[in-house]
Amino acid sequence: MITPVILSGGSGTRLWPLSRKLHPKQLLPLLNKTSLLQDTINRLDGLRDVDHAVVICNEEYRFMVAEQAHATSIDTSAIILEPVGRNTAPAIALAAFNALRSNEKNSEEAILLVLPADHDIRNVSEFHKAIEIGLKQAKEGHFVTFGIVPNAPETGFGYIKAASSVAANEVANIEKFVEKPDVDTATQYLKEGGYYWNSGMFMFKASEYLNVLNEFSPEIYTAAENAMNAANRDMDFIRVGVEEFKKCPADSIDYAVMEKVSNAVVIPVDIGWSDVGSWSALHEIGEQDENKNIIIGDTKCVSTTNSYVRAETKLVTTLGLENIIIVDTEDALLVADKNHVQDIKQIVSALTDEGRDEVTLHKRVCRPWGCYQGIDKADRFQVKRITVNPGARLSLQLHHHRAEHWIVVNGTAKVTKGDEDFILSENESTYIPLGTKHRLENIGQIPLELIEVQTGSYLGEDDIVRFEDVYGREGT
């Protein structure tokens, strides 16, 4: 059986301001109404011998991953939470140990199909054909990777050099892995042939992966094994041992395994692949109009060509522009030349150094119970619009530095305040004094919406002490 392993780490800073640290690109609907993560899982539909998928993600956005994964066509058996990022080799080791323990009777036959969560593949039928070929190779004990047939001298990808030139969907031994080249070197690769973009997609037996990892990177193997031995199941999530995993060295699967084994093979594929790594990449793979523009949202573009314009919150107008990227969000606006979008990480770095919230969060912040959105903010107050899903409830909590006023504008709320419980309906309100235990619950059939006014000397989200929480979040 094939166990899909979806790697959902990374923050996608090159797609700021839409992608944020706590809402990264793989969780965004960039190409259609579903997210890149959901697209990655859904395109497995139709493959034979596919087991439930496993998703590996950061602790901080686990609830968004769970909600999105459950809305796909392939069941998810587990979401493994990484307490810290340690690159791909340790993450895949966690999935390999999980696969062997989940399939003890047939552990030698557990095949991992490792897929990044943030790529786009247009030719799904060719993708399936390549996986079928890769499955046969993996069953024979090979370490399989899929190389993208290049159509340009791309400098943003690493390359795989095949030992012999083969056609798409054929198998070749790997001569070497090559770092990201300069443009002259990349041009030479295309002329020479036999070089393919490193897609980051792999197939191999879980048992073989761990054997090789133990041989070449025993510190990673031991740390991952100890972390899984200390793991516990919490709803959809597998929480690995935090201290055990922190001891794990950081390394990629390329360096730790693929470059060291003698039985690695590459299958070149021509599948309409993109890593969706920049706004210019989104412009290239999207559906352009007659002026080679991609226009999204409330816009009016005149004499504008070869541009990407995305309006999330307001009317955006353009006049006399070419080769421009414009991305509007509620709290940030990006205007960039298409040829400089790879440098957006410099903007993100500068904003990070200044401690700006726009790097980390959107104004609309997702939570397991619903979401909240900032409306106004000053030194000693802020106003939020809070939406609680039907049947959901917040943790029983208190704050040391702020008081809260709640005004229900839609739906019905059950409120716990101190030792009393009561119901609030539309146009009713209550006041939560500083230091008072409180909880909010939606007991109705429609979303509960309320306006929250916070007042106090400190209004940060870390001013919270949790006493009870159905979502297993930490106490503070």
Image (cartoon, helix red, strand yellow):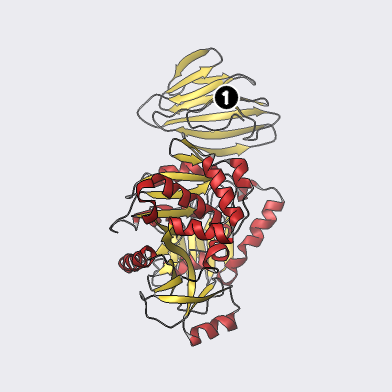
Q: Secondary structure at mark 1?
A: strand
Q: Residue furthest top?
A: 419
The amino acid type found where label 1 is placed reads: Gln
Give percent across and percent down for residue 345. Answer: 63, 61
Image: 409 above or below 217: above
Q: Quadrant of the N terminus?
A: bottom left
Which image quadrant for residue 204?
bottom left
Give percent across and percent down for residue 65. Answer: 45, 45
**Residue at numbered disc 1:** 397
- Name the residue nearer the viewer: 274 or 297: 274
Which image quadrant for residue 267?
bottom left
Q: Residue at x 50, y 87 (%)?
A: 192
> Image check: 161 left or right of 443?
right
Q: Quadrant of the C terminus?
A: top right
Q: Is residue 97 visible?
A: yes
- Name the residue nearer the viewer: 338 or 167: 167
Give percent across and percent down for residue 217. Answer: 59, 59
Image: 282 above or below 353: below
> Image check: 11 left or right of 108?
right
Q: Is residue 292 visible?
A: no
Near mark 1 (Cα within 10 A), the count class, few <14, some 14-19 or many ≥20, is many
